[in-house]
Amino acid sequence: MPTNVIMPQMGESIAEGTLTKWLKKPGESVKRDEPLFEISTDKVDAEIPAPASGVLIQVLVEEGKTVPINTVVAILGEAGESAGAGEPPSAADASKERKEAEPVPPAVAAPSPAAPAPSMVASPSPLPASAPPQPGETTEELLRRRSSPVVRAIAEEHGVDISGIPGTGISGRVTKADILAVLESGAQKAAPVPVAPAAPHSPPAAMTVTVSAPAVPAAPAPPTHAPIVTFSGSAVVVEPMSAMRKKIAERMVASKQTSAHVTSVFEVDFTNIARLRNRVKERFEAQYGTKLTYMPFVFRAAITALKARPLLNASISADEIVFHKEINLGMAVALDWGLIVPVIRRADDLSLVGLARAANDLADRARTKKLLPDEVAGGTFTITNHGGFGSLFASPVINQPQVAILGVGAIEKRAKVATMPDGSDTIAVRTMAYMGVTFDHRLIDGAEGDTFMSIVKNTLENERWTELESL
Amino acid sequence: MDGAGVALTRPIEVVSLLSGGRVAYDAALRLQREAEARVLAGGRETLFLLSHEDVITIGRNADRKDLLVSESFLAEKGIAVRESDRGGKLTFHGPGQLVAYPVLSLAPGRTDVRRYVHDLEETLILAAADFGVPATRSDLPGRWSSVWVGNDKLAAIGVHLSRWVTTHGLALNVSTDLSRFALIVPCGIPDGGVTSLERLLAPRPVPALADVAARLVGHFCEVFDRTPAP
């Protein structure tokens, strides 16, 4: 049974490798894990072990050639076996072999160099090891073939080819519902498969009594709360509300009556950013004349996530969803006399330095009352740094007509549990923060909100921030 | 925090050969091979610190044309020439240069060659900064590994991986005889010079190799989340 040997993935940002040397000649036998060839990427030279024991039947990539990752570079087989007509096995053959083949290095769709790493987060679970990329397979086909073990088991039982089913799951994955629909439609000879009801759990009867208020009022009534207690006389000092205070009060209540607020909190490791920032902040300020805070990093992470999940950069207009092509980031600035949200327009066009400048400039001018009217309008998404006051997590109010707001909790060193290579646990000191997204559940479901947050988290933890490295 | 977010704090054995004199290239290679076998067998990682006798090493991607003089000429001068299974092109090692060879397992969690090189660069940048030298990465294509001060290269990087276990590593010019680099085209980059901490710090005194090594180890452990084994 021939085994394909592929150019392995040597890192997320690596799209290709140069095969520098074959350590075995065609006809020679090799044991599994014995070095078979050498590759070179960047300043690194790596020995690649054979994925299986066997005889090197055919070398498909010569020494000195550079090929994309996952390219089949050779075929291993048993002694006396030939590689057929000299062609790599077809995808259909390969998919049959999948179970016999040794696990091939990371089964990840080849990232194009232009694709930002965070886009990989869009598929939250790692690919099953049993679905290595096959030669000649497009990314789309790979994504489609990827499916849960349950789906594969059903497919196997009924002899269904998963790659032929249009998937409705993430990235076109074939879900259990998809495959059951195909079976039921009679496309295949289908034995009925018991299906767990997908309906949400009904709350226990006792709970329905206590939760008697309607979850969604048919039409929001104007607030008519009568004051519970009236204070008067010398016990109080009465002051008229400022115009700003009245406006804030009006908007906050209006937002709460408009949107179905839900908050989801992630914990984000800022250790890498903290180290980088400590290293470059003085030079950054000297060179660019503005302070380097954590906020530009958060803005950049939010921009990356908003590009990937544009629903969070949308608005609701009656029955329609309005997607905004521009990312105009509102940043909540606390003032002694209230709160204002100046907007960084087209924030996605700005570099990290540009974001730092814009944020510091807008905050300064907000505090000195020098903002222009245009600078507080047109936001499509808001970020609030409530952690600046020590708050760990908060559930801020959405700034209408936006549909989401990102909160940043206090960024501080915490003791985290890390697992050692031998499986024992130890305590590590990491710079951490809770970050929460509050979103409008009318438009955004929990999975969407959490996918957005996972991109924010991944960007903050893993982005390279190359602009700062040359400082 | 999920598992992927936590860098492991593994113990690492720091072996300094600096006080014992200069180490021949072949001997250092043997030490690394032994350490590599230990790590592949699940044993403890090692960070070797040393300086070499004069040697020009030829990496996997090297063009021998980058060697500008004959090997017999080099032999007369007492400079050895060795082919090496590291990545990168030609470089020179000799007295006054701090060489660090981390024998690490990048799995799990760090299986990314570019990240590894990046982290070695970070270690070098932090160590150079401790002595007031602002080393940076370069944006120029073809030069983006290793660290630079202006147009001059302060250190060299070349790595070998076997099943994600690293050998070879980095070489930082502290007080290296820079004229030796005139014998080769370092790293195959003809238009960039080489420099050393000594040259950059002059007329201030150059730090001792052991002092630079101490800083390098500290930053290495910080960047790689390792703890020096007792």
Image (cartoon, coloured by chain):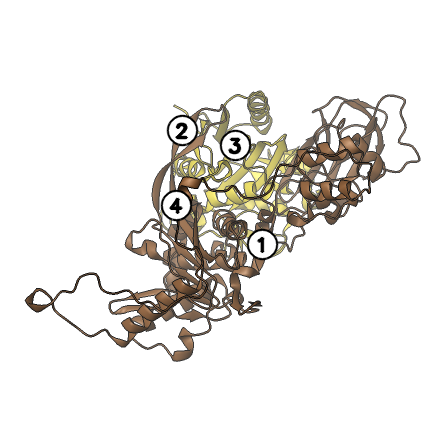
- Spatial CA distance of label 4 from label 2 is 47 Å
Depth-wise, is mark 4 or mark 2 nearer the camera? 4
Amino acid type of the residue tagged 3 in the rendering: Pro
**Mark 4 highlights which residue?**
A209
Upstream in sequence: badge 4 or badge 2: 4
Tell me where residue A11 appears, x and y as whole percent: 62, 42
For label 2, count other residues whose C-alpha is less than 10 Å away and answer few (under 14), some (14-19) or many (20+): some
Quadrant of the drawing holding the C terminus of chain A:
bottom left
Residue B28 versus residue A308 in the image, above or below = above
Residue displayed at 89% across by 31% down = A83
- Spatial CA distance of label 4 from label 3 is 65 Å
Residue B172 versus residue B141 in the image, above or below = above
Q: Secondary structure at mark 2?
A: strand
Upstream in sequence: badge 1 or badge 3: 3
Chain A display color: brown
Amino acid type of the residue tagged 4 in the rendering: Val
Colour yellow belongs to chain: B
- Residue furthest to the bottom: A373
User: Which chain hosts label 1?
Assistant: B
Quadrant of the drawing holding the N terminus of chain A:
top right
Asked if the residue at tag 3 contacts the one at tag 2, i.e. Cβ–Cβ closer than 8 Å, the answer is no
Depth-wise, is mark 1 or mark 4 nearer the camera? 4
Q: Secondary structure at mark 4?
A: helix
Asked if the residue at tag 2 contacts the one at tag 1, i.e. Cβ–Cβ closer than 8 Å, the answer is no
**Mark 3 highlights which residue?**
B102
- Spatial CA distance of label 2 from label 3 is 23 Å
To the question of a shared chain for discs 1 and 4, the answer is no
**Mark 1 highlights which residue?**
B192
**Mark 2 highlights which residue?**
A426
Q: From where the camera sits, is residue A5 visible?
A: yes
Give the left or right position of residue A135, taking residue A425 as reference. right
Tell me where residue A430 appears, x and y as whole percent: 39, 40
